[in-house]
Every structure is written in structure tokens, then in C-alpha cells.
Amino acid sequence: MPLIIICGIPSSGKTTRAKQITQYFLNRFSSQEKIGNVHLINDESLGITKDSYKDTRVEEKKARASLISAVERLVSKEDVVIADGMNYIKGYRYQLYCIARAVGTPHCVIYCGTPIEIAREWNFNRGEEGYEATIFDELVSRFEEPDDRNRWDSPLFTVLYDDPVPSYDGIWDAIIVKKAKPPNLST
Ligand code: ADP
Ligand code: MG
């Protein structure tokens, strides 16, 4: 079933949006008596701490690998999978897109459009829970904004930081209403 890839700079609201979208899908599944489960995969659910982003990138690579394998395991089932985390690198989103394509299921990308200074403020307000200032800056500089001209970043939905209750209907229409396409091996 469909894969939803959340991306954005640190503390831009990714996990907050991922939870809103989870709730939205659960509500729609139950109101339409459709059978559907939603798996939310993120640092918290995998037990990955913010220290994974420190110093070397070895820990981060491990964290990324565990997220990838969780997505691989779940995406083949009849459920919606939301990949919330570490999706700031283009090549990584491409990898996730390939997993969805391999099982012939739709995917989409949600971009948390939050200005750096706002995310920095939200990060600071998190206190101990937030990223250290240097890690925050480093992750921001490595973030590669999604571009819907790339097939792995399309369809792309941008959720703006100042929209407390955005409509997620477009996401539903894009990945649930649309019939699952067979994998296209020529692209
Ligand atoms: P991320 O997963 O991108 O690191 P989170 O969703 O955990 O970001 O949010 C980071 C912090 O910002 C949290 O403390 C959260 O409560 C706060 N936050 C998220 N969205 C908003 C918002 N729209 N307005 C104010 N604070 C927010
Ligand atoms: Mg998060």
C-alpha cells in the first residue's frame, strides 16, 4: 500500500504532520469502512536518538538503514506506511521511492515548508529534546529541497508552517483513489 515520505529541515514539524496525517487516514478509513492500517515509522518508533546525527555519519547511516528496512518490511502489506525522518537527502528519497515502485504501490512526498528561523526557534523551544545548534545547522545545510520535476519527489505536497489544520484530501486522492500501478521497469 502507499508510501508517504515526509521531509523537511530539523524541527520543521515533520513528526507533528506525520501524526496528523496518520489520524486523517485512520479517520477516513473508518468513516468509509475501508480496511486500512497506518504504520508511522520514525526515529522515535525505531528508538533512534538525536545523538545519531552527531560527529561521524556512521550512526546516522545505521539509523537510516533501520528506517529503510522497516519501510521495506511494511510497504508490501495492505497498509499505509509513513516514513517520517531523515529524508533530507535526495538520494535517500529516491531509495524510498524505489521500494514503493518495486511493489507497484503509489507514493508521495510531503514537504514541511517551515522557514529556517522558525524551525530554529521551535528547535530551541524543545530544550533537551531538540537538536544541538551545530547539528541543526549542519542538517539544514545538507537538506536538499524536494523538486517535483524528479519522479521520486512527485506528487509533492507542501504543508506550510502557519497552516495549523491543512487539508490532507489531496494526499488521499493521490495515493488511495489512484489505483496502484504495476512497477514500470523501463524508467
Ligand atoms: P521534526 O519532526 O521535523 O523535528 P516536530 O514535529 O517534532 O519536528 O516539531 C518540532 C517542535 O516544533 C516540537 O516541539 C513541536 O511541538 C513544535 N511545532 C511543530 N509544529 C508546530 C507549529 N505549527 N507551531 C508551533 N510549534 C510547532
Ligand atoms: Mg521528528
Image (tube, helix red, strand yellow):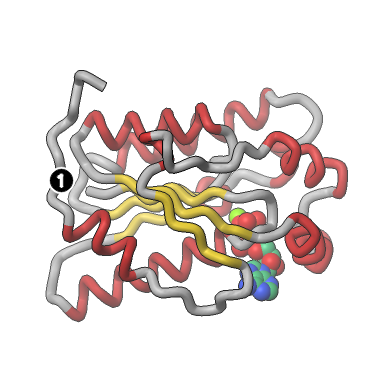
**In which quadrant of the rendered view does residue 143 lie?**
top right
Q: Is residue 111 above or below residue 100?
A: below
How far across and how far down the image is residue 135, in percent? 80, 41
Q: Which residue is mark 1?
A: 180
Residue pictured at 69% horizontal, 57% vertical:
11
Residue pictured at 77% horizontal, 60% vertical:
123
How far across and how far down the image is residue 47, in percent? 58, 47
Quadrant in which ligand 2 is drawn: bottom right
Residue pictured at 52% horizontal, 46% vertical:
46
Amino acid bearing label 1: Ala
How far across and how far down the image is residue 45, in percent? 51, 52
Report the side of 54 relative to 60 (left or right). right
Dot 1: element: loop
Report the side of 174 relative to 42 (left or right). left
Q: In front: 110, or 34?
A: 110
Q: In front: 5, or 79?
A: 5
